[in-house]
Image: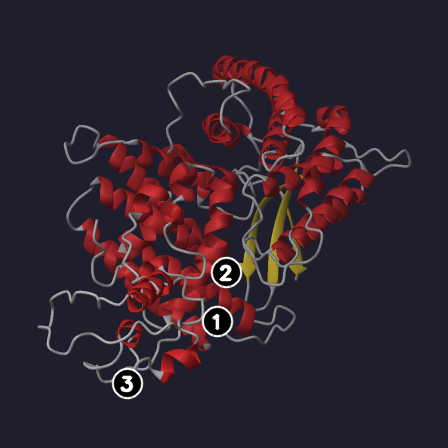
């Protein structure tokens, strides 16, 4: 298949030095055959030219000047000349013929672009941002979501202008944080004041404009795919700037789009293919995991829009591919997360709903009992492979879910004290994700699964040594990883530990009256301040319905 003009340069490694080409010379009509084939100027010395002798070539002699151009000339009758011509033909360099390669048949879609290649239709300004997204951010996102769509997101960026501008905006904003922001200085200016920040704002506004234009044509597969993907990127851009309320609104808008698309199933223009299912699953996972932490408030509105999976959850076999195992777990985890959001944070289950809640709890526990031996067998088999780490994440998540389901109905939180050994094992698993050395650049590698696991251990395990170990693991695991602004969150978790420690008795036990849960936070990223809010686990609402709240200022 011939390569279209311009496409060829997208298939070449541009980091290779350019091939040196010989300078052009005027064509020689009367030179020797060897010089003609070499396309160099012949000195025409007879019977054999001096240029061939100096260059180490065997001169093939001269053609008959009386022969018509373009016709084969019979070889001379002398045997010496004939032998010399044959030897010259054997030593003569062969003419290179162009070779057409159908790259799409040899490589997967996400590997078509070589590691250091920037598409030729991008501006020079776009190149560094595209390379940063391709070499780092794309890999981080695929680690979170695991679905096939997110592993091949580079193909979407190449095809969709809106997604491409959103990806460039995210990469530019990350570089703006690295080069233009000083986390230790409260006087740091807005990120958009530096060159990278201005570029990020330009890409961001262009992506928003393209999203709006696309939605004018109604809800289709393309618009849902494009808008959910860009919303995912927009949320990370706003987190980098500390705009938590904007993140909340973006996720609410994305959930509303999913709801409208789900209700429009009867339309011929919308088909819930595997690609859209993968996008929705990844988006739901991010929404639910953020909703399970106290730093995002809008997710309380979002989770009511997410529909649980009506189908029974499939338990994969131990021989299933890792992608299938992670997909099955993510769907189960999303439904379990919706259940946790409906009953967590001191919510009292009314008697009329108790039967339904207990039935749901029993169903989740039964499936977790099937997952545990499967995960143990897979971890033993894959201990020396790259699959060990994602499987470890699933194991820690399953253990965390088991502890929660066993204890959430106890409003005093004392039941969590029975799971100290499980908390220790969870933290030991999380220690595997501590990098051996700090990364050279800011990264997005903090997994969406790991943060809720560690924060859950800090808030629910009242053993002082285990808590401090969990805080240390959180600090080391998230060093120079800005996606969650870990310094503010780490100090807010430390504030909760210090608050409860004040009520610890001489035996080290924390009574229910001194136990708290995290209910919210107010961020001021420009001043590097946050107001963390806590409520006692046995508090009773006032006449106005409010809960007595302890507010602690945190600087980071």
Classify residue 183 by image quadrant. bottom right
Residue 228 appears at what percent x and percent y?
33, 45
**Label 2 to label 1: alpha-carbon separation:** 9 Å
Residue hosting label 2: 240
Secondary structure found at label 1: helix
Residue 191 numbered mark, or none: 1
Residue 39 appears at what percent x and percent y?
28, 76
Sequence-wise first label, 2 or 3: 3
Residue 355 numbered mark, or none: none
Residue 318 appears at what percent x and percent y?
55, 19
Query: Badge 3 local density, few (<14 within 10 Å), some, or many (20+)?
Result: some
What is the residue that sits farthest to the front in this orientation?
78
Quadrant for the C terminus, please: bottom right
- For residue 515, say whether it is visible: no
**Label 2 to label 3: alpha-carbon separation:** 72 Å
Classify residue 28 by image quadrant. bottom left
Residue 44 numbered mark, or none: 3
For image coordinates 91% across by 37% down, the residue present is 506
For image coordinates 76% across by 41% down, the residue present is 467
Residue 284 located left or right of residue 457 = left
Sequence-wise first label, 1 or 3: 3
């Amino acid at each position: 298949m011939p390569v279209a003009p311009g496409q060829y340069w997208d298939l070449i490694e541009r980091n290779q030095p350019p091939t040196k080409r010989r300078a052009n010379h005027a064509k020689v009509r009367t030179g020797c055959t060897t010089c003609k084939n070499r396309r160099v100027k012949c000195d025409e010395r007879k019977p054999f030219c001096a240029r061939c002798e100096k260059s180490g070539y065997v001169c093939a002699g001269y053609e008959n000047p009386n022969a018509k151009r373009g016709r084969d000339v019979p070889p001379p009758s002398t045997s010496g000349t004939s032998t010399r011509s044959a030897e010259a033909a054997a030593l003569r360099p062969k003419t290179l013929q162009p070779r057409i390669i159908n790259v799409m048949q040899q490589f997967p879609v996400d590997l078509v672009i070589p590691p250091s290649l920037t598409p030729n239709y991008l501006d020079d300004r776009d190149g560094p941002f595209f390379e940063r997204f391709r070499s780092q951010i794309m890999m981080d996102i695929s680690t979170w979501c695991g679905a096939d769509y997110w592993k091949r997101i580079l193909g979407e960026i190449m095809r969709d202008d809106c997604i491409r501008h959103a990806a460039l905006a995210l990469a530019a904003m990350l570089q703006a944080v690295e080069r233009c922001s000083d986390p230790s200085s409260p006087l740091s200016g807005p990120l958009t004041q530096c060159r990278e920040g201005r570029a990020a704002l330009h890409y961001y506004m262009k992506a928003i404009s393209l999203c709006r234009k696309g939605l004018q044509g109604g809800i289709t597969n393309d618009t849902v795919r494009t808008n959910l993907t860009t919303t995912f990127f927009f949320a990370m851009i706003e987190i980098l700037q500390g705009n938590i309320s904007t993140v909340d609104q973006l996720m609410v808008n994305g959930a509303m789009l999913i709801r409208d698309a789900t209700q429009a199933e009867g339309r011929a223009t919308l088909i819930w293919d595997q690609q859209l299912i993968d996008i929705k699953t990844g988006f739901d996972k991010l929404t639910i995991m953020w909703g399970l932490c106290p730093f995002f408030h809008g997710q309380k509105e979002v989770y009511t829009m997410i529909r649980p999976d009506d189908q029974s959850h499939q338990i994969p076999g131990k021989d299933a591919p890792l992608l299938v195992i992670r997909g099955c777990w993510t769907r189960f985890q999303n439904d379990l997360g919706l259940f946790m959001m409906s009953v967590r944070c001191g919510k009292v289950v009314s008697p009329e709903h108790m039967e339904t809640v207990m039935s749901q709890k029993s169903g989740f526990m039964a499936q977790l009992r099937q997952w545990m031996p499967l995960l143990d067998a897979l971890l033993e088999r894959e201990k020396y492979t790259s699959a060990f780490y994602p499987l470890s994440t699933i194991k820690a998540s399953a253990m965390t879910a088991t502890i929660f389901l066993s204890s959430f109905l106890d409003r005093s939180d004392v039941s969590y004290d029975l799971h100290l050994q499980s908390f220790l094992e969870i933290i030991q698993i999380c220690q595997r994700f501590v990098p051996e050395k700090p990364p050279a650049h800011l990264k997005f590698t903090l997994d969406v699964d790991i943060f809720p696991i560690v924060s859950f251990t800090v808030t629910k395990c009242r053993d002082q040594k285990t808590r401090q170990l969990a805080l240390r693991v959180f600090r080391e695991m998230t060093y120079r990883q800005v996606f969650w602004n870990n310094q503010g969150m780490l100090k807010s978790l430390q504030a909760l530990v210090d608050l409860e420690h004040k009520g610890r008795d001489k035996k080290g036990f924390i009574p229910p009256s001194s136990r708290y849960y995290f209910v919210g936070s107010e961020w001021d990223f420009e001043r590097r301040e946050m107001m963390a809010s806590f409520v006692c686990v046995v508090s009773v609402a006032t006449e106005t319905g409010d809960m007595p709240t302890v507010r602690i200022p945190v600087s980071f």
